[in-house]
Image: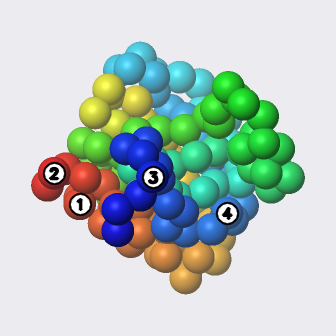
Amino acid sequence: IGGAGAAETLVVLKGEYLNKAKISDGGKKLRKNWASTWVVLETDKLLFYKESKQEALTNLKPGCSPDGVDLCGAVVEWTTERSSRKNVVQITTSSGSEFLLQADNYPTICKWHDAIKSTADNLSKG
Ligand code: I3P
């Protein structure tokens, strides 16, 4: 592809609202708090925004970087054990943080699971 700079990333999946809960941070367990989150998948990371309109606003502000997770070395898997909800995907980062993503609509969450998993797997092959 040959981009302008090494830092260039591309959007793999356009933003969509999913339910998100961070359940551990660097190996430390956190109190689960599900929140509707605008999620965007890029070639090397998953970005989280409170609302869709924040995506464009954050990108306009120099020095302002969104909340997100580095997918290099991340493990992406379906889980039925970490939540009573259906359709839950667990993402465990290389730094030991754990996130859950969920949507009631199965095709929606499947699409995100498959895309995040293949992105992470490709990066890890590196
Ligand atoms: C949690 C809340 C979460 C639930 C979690 C509860 O209680 O009900 O929705 O997760 O279950 O602990 P609180 O609001 O008092 O923190 P799920 O919806 O994913 O089941 P858990 O402790 O089994 O993770």
Image location (x, y in percent) of residue 27: 35, 21
Mark 3–mark 1 Cα distance, whole angstroms, equals 22 Å
N-terminal label among 1 and 4: 4
N-terminal label among 3 and 1: 3
Please name the residue shown 32% across and 28% down the image.
96
Please name the residue shown 55% across and 68% down the image.
13
Mark 3–mark 2 Cα distance, whole angstroms, equals 20 Å
Pointer 4: residues within 10 angstroms few (<14), some, or many (20+)?
A: some
Residue wearing tag 3? 4
| Tag 3 and tag 2, C-beta contact below 8 Å | no
Query: Position of 124 compared to 75: left or right?
Result: left
Query: Is residue 25 depicted above or below 125 in this figure?
Result: above
Mark 1–mark 4 Cα distance, whole angstroms, equals 21 Å
Query: Which label lies toward us, 4 or 2?
Result: 2
Farthest residue toward the left?
125
Please name the residue shown 67% across and 63% down the image.
15
User: Which of the labelled discs sits on residue 122, or is there none?
Assistant: 1
Residue wearing tag 2? 126
Query: Which label lies toward us, 4 or 3?
Result: 3
Residue wearing tag 4? 15
The answer to which of 83 and 73 lies nearer the viewer is 73
Query: Is residue 99 depicted above or below 77 in this figure?
Result: above
Q: Coloring scheme of the render?
A: rainbow
Mark 4–mark 3 Cα distance, whole angstroms, equals 24 Å
Residue 88 shows up from this direction? no
Q: Secondary structure at mark 2?
A: loop
Query: Which label lies toward us, 3 or 2?
Result: 3
The answer to which of 24 and 67 lies nearer the viewer is 67
| Tag 2 and tag 1, C-beta contact below 8 Å | yes
